[in-house]
Amino acid sequence: MSTSDSTVEELDVLVIGSGFAGIYQLHRLRNLGHSVKIFEAGSALGGIWYWNCYPGARVDTEGPIYQFAYQDLWKDWEYQALYPDWSEVREYFDYVDRKLDISRDVRFNTRVESAEFDTERNQWVVRSSDGATTRCTYLVPCLGFASKPYVPTIPGLDSYRGISHHTGLWPQDGVDLTGKRVAVIGTGASGVQVIQEAASDAADVTVFQRTPNLAIPMGQRTLTPADQAAIKAELPERFASRASTFAGFDYDFTPINAVDLPEQERTAGYEELWEKGGFRFWLATFQDTLFDQKSNDYAYTFWRDKVRARIKDPLLAEKLAPTDPIHPFGVKRPSLEQNYYDVYNQDNLHLVDLNETPIETVTERGIRTADGTEREFDVIVLATGFDSVSGGLTRLDIRGTDGTLLRDKWADGISAHLGVATAGFPNLLFVYGPQSPSGFCNGPTCAEIQGEMIVEIVEHLLCNGHQRIESTPEADQAWSEHVAELVGPTLFTKAKSWYMGANIPGKAIQSLNYPGGLPLYQEKYAESKANGYAGFRIS
Ligand code: N01
């Protein structure tokens, strides 16, 4: 390898990405005295919140627990909205930067393109878009689970002459939708947010829906000074509880089965969760909801009736909240909505059901559907999702010890012990990695909890004179099997979702996230650590 000249920077740790996870790594490892830098493709901190600045982009976690748990940080920080929008979250990142002086070790506008392991020196040789080569002992991708936008093959898309953007690659200077004719393709979390926002500004919004989103009420509000004081008082306890819940929130499933309850009690339970808002109707609900079809049907029926009561046109109501579920409730990610179902009562909102009239082609001026109708648009929003969890990693040219590219190794399915490392790729340690809690976890919670595991591993290796760690093929395989065993009895397998990799044509179907919840995940890690990092080969 021709990289031994003195212009090649050498680091203990190179972190990729400056979202919550990357910042945590940099701050902790730097404080421990290691040389560490972040390479960041964007021009500012924020990760997902840098790229996803589309109209309406907003956190679906309550702001108070969507931040780092360091007291030095939270004591002086207040989000103004219970569910902050992207611009407030960016302000938070600026605040963190001022407090922790993160940026001085971040190389912005620098996309990591390839990494090759030098087996002689036990280092990664990393090449980046600025033409530089960097050597590092540990490479820690902190890419988030949604860093590779997915644009489906839609005939004619390239011929369109209007404005068209994917939500995850939204222009930094924004797109003014005022008075425009807007098409939104996709009704996942991103689509639902854009639609609500566009409905108030655009002249017309046409939603191209393939699968309805089973969205639930956000319960958004502006936080008053009294709220802020109460939040400050409760925060230590709320932060502490995050580690003990399934998804890193400060609430968890109710340890009662819906099927065991008389109807009145069950409905009262649903009503309470609905009223409290947020993800509670999904993640604080009866414990059998995501396992038992009958229980799930109860939840679906409650959801459907609540939603339909808000939609005036019965045909539209049937499309948005069908009588019979298209898939079980909660096995695709429900969005949090503020007025999603109400905006469909407006004259400027139109729904095209892609199951009845698929898109035939995008034209120069708009979209033509299979019934021959051509609608003209000024803006087409592609809210079509991501090659989630593994896509950010497999798009990089990461080459392991035998020359195999990571994307080739995972072509038939991902395997990574604890979601942290994969055999043949030494010293490559993932935060939010494949088959870790990742997309099932509140971001800052996992940035800290899973992030701390990586910090511990790196610290252990660097301080004990070890040079190399990699998982064994057996441990990778065992972890995949464990994940498959956990997801098997759930209802997650009954929907074509990104959770199962099913949104990307040709991608292997498997649970991309760890479905056992954060407490069990931590137990598994602790077990490995207590046994000398079992499942890893250290040398
Ligand atoms: O992506 P998605 P997303 N023709 O994959 C449709 C997080 N997030 O960006 O359901 C027509 O959920 C597709 O249809 P279908 C969150 O974890 C968080 O919305 O496959 N339509 C679907 O409706 C979320 O789960 C937040 O039938 C096509 C949509 O595009 C994850 O990111 C905000 C199509 C994609 O939905 C991803 O959400 C936003 C085609 N060929 C996102 N291909 C917050 O917390 C796909 N679709 C704030």
Image: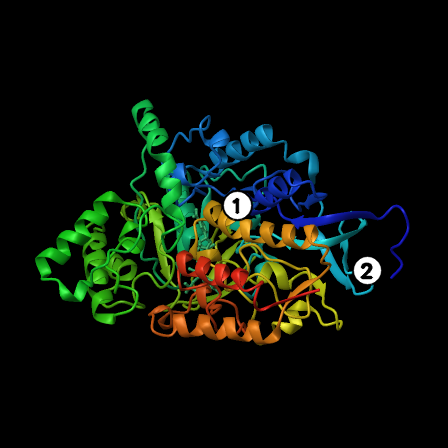
Q: 318 or 135, which is in the foreground?
A: 135
In this image, 273 relative to 520: left or right?
left
Mark 1 nearby-residue class (10 Å; few <14, some 14–19, many ≥20): many
Marker disc for residue 52 = 1
Q: Position of residue 227 (x, y in %)?
A: 31, 28
> Percent position (x, y) of residue 474?
58, 76
Q: Is residue 478 visible?
A: yes
Q: Residue at x 89, y 47 (%)?
A: 6
Q: Quadrant of residue 391?
A: bottom right
Q: Does the residue labelled 2 lie within 8 Å of ligand 1?
A: no
Rendered residue at 37%/35% (across/down):
235
The residue identified by callout 2 is: 121
Where ligand 1 lies, by image quadrant?
bottom left
Residue 247: x and y, percent? 39, 54
Viewer-nearest residue: 277 or 353: 277
- Amino acid carrying label 1: it is Asn
CA separation in Å, label 2 and label 1: 39 Å
SS category of the residue bearing label 2: loop
- Quadrant where the image shows the N terminus: bottom right
Quadrant where the C terminus is found in the figure: bottom right
Label 2 crowding class (10 Å Cα cut-off): few <14, some 14-19, many 20+? Answer: few
Dot 1: element: loop
Q: Do the residues labelled 2 and 1 touch (CB within 8 Å)?
A: no
**Is label 1 within 8 A of ligand 1 (CB to nearest ligand atom)?**
yes
Badge 2 amino acid: Arg
For residue 288, side relative to residue 180 (left or right)? left
